[in-house]
Image (spheres, rainbow, N blue to C red):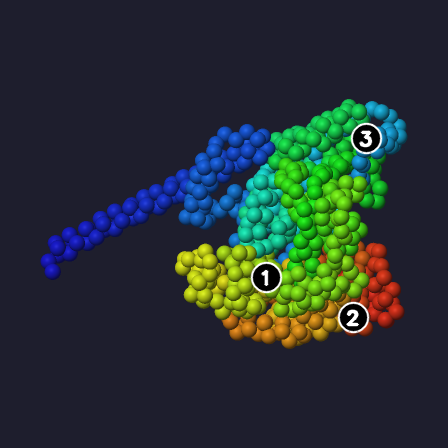
Amino acid sequence: MPSWIRWFFSRSILHLTGLAKCAGTAYKLAVMAMAKDVKKRIEQLRAEIRKHDYLYYVLSQPEITDRQYDKLFVELKALEQANPQFITPDSPTQRVSGRPLEGFTTVRHAVPMLSMDNTYNADELRAFDERVAKGLGSRDFDYVVELKIDGVAINLRYEDGTLATAATRGDGEVGDDVTANVRTIKAIPLVLLAGREIPAVLEVRGEVYMPTHSFVELNRLRTEAGEPAFANPRNAAAGSLKLLDARITAERNLAFFAYSIGELSGPLAENHYQTLQRFKRFGLPVNPNIKKAGDIDEVINICISWSEKRLDLGYQIDGMVIKVNRFDQRDVLGATGRAHRWCISYKFPAEQAETIVESIDVQVGKSGILTPVANLTPVQLSGTTVKRASLHNFDELNRLDVRCGDTVVIEKAGEIIPQVVEVKKQARPAGAVHFKVPEQCPNCGGKVKKDEDGVYIRCLNPDCLGQLKERLKYFAGRGQMDIENLGDALIEQLVDTGLVKNFADLYKLQKPDLIELERMAEKSAGNVIEAIEKSKTRPLWRLVTALGIRHIGGQSAQILAEHFGSLEALMKSDQETLESIDQIGPKMAESIYEYFRAPQNRAVIENLLAAGVKPQRPKPVTRRTDKLAGKTIVVTGILQNFARQQAEYTIRQAGGRPASSVSKKTDFLLAGKEPGSKLEKAKKLGVKVINEKQFLQMLDKGAS
C-alpha cells in the first residue's frame, strides 16, 4: 500500500476518534442534565403532593380535585420507577410496604401513655373541677375541650422531622410497632413541614380512626366475601393496624387526629392549645372542633351541645375530653398510677330507641353456637334503620325475658351492631309467651348442648349444613384463605347442591360444576376457580386460622406457625408442648390438640394437601449465636432493656426457646420488676432465677 494512502487513513481514524470522544462527552453531559432535570421534577412533585396533603388533611381546604391529585401521584410514581436511584423512604409513593410483615415487635414508650378517668354527668364534671382547683390552690386556670374520637391511640415518633416509628398504646408502657401500617395513612405526614422550628425528637400522640363511610363500605365488602362484619369503626381501625400486610391496611382508608405530645427534645409551647396550633403548622391534622373554656360551666355547655351535633360528624365520637391547658399546672397536678389528674373524659349516654320484636330467629355459627336474634319493626337509631338486634345468647334472652310482640329498648352505645337492653313489660301484649330454648338444632335437627361453665348452646352434629356454610364463609374470608368471588350466595348453593361437604371439596371444583349453578356464567365461574387456585399457597398461619379451631384466631395462628414452621409439626405436637408456647394458654392448647386428633379433621387436611394446598412456611428467625442453644427460658416481670417480645426474640436468635409457663423443663426464669407468681413457682421447682444483667452476660459469654 502506498505511503500516502496509509497517511490518509491514519489521519481519518484520528479525526473520527476525536469526534467520537466529543460525542461521548456530549452524551454524558446530556444524560447528566436530563438526570438533574428528572431529580428536580421528582422533588417538585413530592413538594406539591405534600402541600396538597396539608391543604386537604390539615386545613380542609383542597385546591385541586382528586383526579388532579392522582395525576401528580401517577407522574411521580412513573418517574421514580424509571429512576429508582432517586427513590427516598419519605416519598409519598413509599407509604405502602411491598411485602407482609412476619410479626409485630414491641416499643417501650419514652413517656407512658396513661389512661383517663370518666364522668357521665355535669355533677361529676364539677367535682373534677373542684379537685383541680384544690390541687392548684387557685382558680386561675382554663381548659381545652376536645371531641373524644372513637379510635385507636397511637404514638408517632418524629426524628429530625421524619417519621421514625409508630406504636400503639398497648398497656401504656409498651405498645406494638405498627409503623408499616401507619405509613399508609395519608393524613399522617411522613415528613413534617420544613422551617417550622421542629424539635429533633418530637412524639405526637393522637387517634387513628375509620371514617363512617369507609366503615360502611368495608363491612359491605366483608359481608359479600363471607367474612364477619366489624362491630364498630374502632374495632375496624384496631384490626386494620394489626394486619401483617400493609397493602390491605392501605385499602382501609384510615384517618388521624393529633391531640398531645410524648417525648420532646426541646421546648415547643407553654400550653396545650398553643401546641395544637404548632401541630397544624408542622402539617399534622388537628380536629377543628377544639375549644378553649374559661370555667367549668363553659365546659359543660360545650359537652352538652355536642351530645346532639355528634350525629352530623363523618366519624364516631363517644364523648368529650377536658384538659387543663397550662403545662406547668399539669406538672403540679401530676397523675395517679393509671391516669392524669389534669384531664378527664365526659362520656355521652348511649343512643337508644324503642321498637317492637316481630319475631325471634336462631342462627347457627361456624362452631355450632346457636344465637338468638330479634327481628324488629324498623326504627331509626344513630342515623341508620335498624331491623335486627342481637340477643347474644339464651341466658341473656331469659334475663331480659324478651318475647315476640314486646316493646323493647335498643341501643348502640358506640357500637354499630344494635342490641336489646330493656323490655317494656308494661306494654307487653296479652298472650305473649316465653321463647323456648331450642332442644335441637334449627338447621339440621341434631342434638344441642350447653357449654360446661359457659353460656353458649351448640349443635353437636359435625355434619350440620348450617355450621358447614358458616365455616366455609370463614375459611374463604379475606383474613383467612382470601378466596375472592366466593361469596355467601355461592357457598349456600355449593352446600345445598352437595358439591362441597368440607374445605377440601372447594379445591376439587371444576368450571363445569359452577356453570350449572344459578347466576353463574362461564367467566364468573372461571374467576372463582382461579381465585381458589391462588389460595393454595397462602402462608401457613392463614390456613391454621381458616380451619376455625376453637379459641384460635389470626394472632394465635401466627404464633403457632412461627413456632412449628410446618402444618405437619403442628399436627404432631402434644398438649404439653402447646401449653409451653407463649400466649397459647391451656384451653387453646387443649382445643388445638383435640382438633388435630379428630379423624374427620385429619382426613379433611390430608385431602387439602392432596388437592395441592401448599401452605408457605414462615421465614425462620435468623440465629445469630448459639449462646442459649437448647435452653428453655421463661420471661416475667418488667425489664429495663427489653420489652417482653423483644427478650423472647433475642432468646430465639441466641438458639434458646422462650416459654410462657414455668415447669420442670425450664432452665432459667428471667425475672424483672414485679415478677408475680412465676417467681414463686420457679423457686418451688428449683429453677434457676436470673436477672437482666445476668441474662446479658449469658448472651455475651453463653449459658452455663
Asked where in the image residue 653 lies, by quadrant, the reply is bottom right
Q: Secondary structure at mark 1?
A: helix
Foreground label between 2 and 3: 3
Depth order, front residue of 300/220: 220
- Which residue is identified by label 3? 122
* Amino acid identity at mark 1: Lys
- Marks 2 and 3, how far apart in space? 55 Å
Q: Is residue 7 visible?
A: yes
Percent coordinates x, y for residue 123 in the rendering: 84, 31
- Which residue is identified by label 2? 666
Residue located 57% across and 31% down the image: 60
Residue 173 falls left or right of residue 56: right
Q: Secondary structure at mark 3?
A: helix
Say which quadrant the C terminus sits in. Answer: bottom right
Q: Secondary structure at mark 2?
A: loop
Q: Are marks 3 and 1 in contact (CB under 8 Å)?
A: no
Depth order, front residue of 250/635: 250
Percent coordinates x, y for residue 565 in the rendering: 62, 69
Placement of 671 over or under 29, stated as above or below: below
Placement of 143 over or under 566, stated as above or below: above
Q: Residue furthest left?
A: 2
Residue 353 falls left or right of residue 680: left
- Mark closest to the chain's N terminus, 3 or 1: 3
Q: Are marks 2 and 1 in contact (CB under 8 Å)?
A: no
- Which residue is identified by label 1? 469
Q: Which dot marks residue 353?
A: none
- Marks 2 and 1, how far apart in space? 44 Å
* Amino acid identity at mark 3: Ala
Foreground label between 2 and 1: 1
Percent coordinates x, y for residue 457 in the rendering: 73, 61
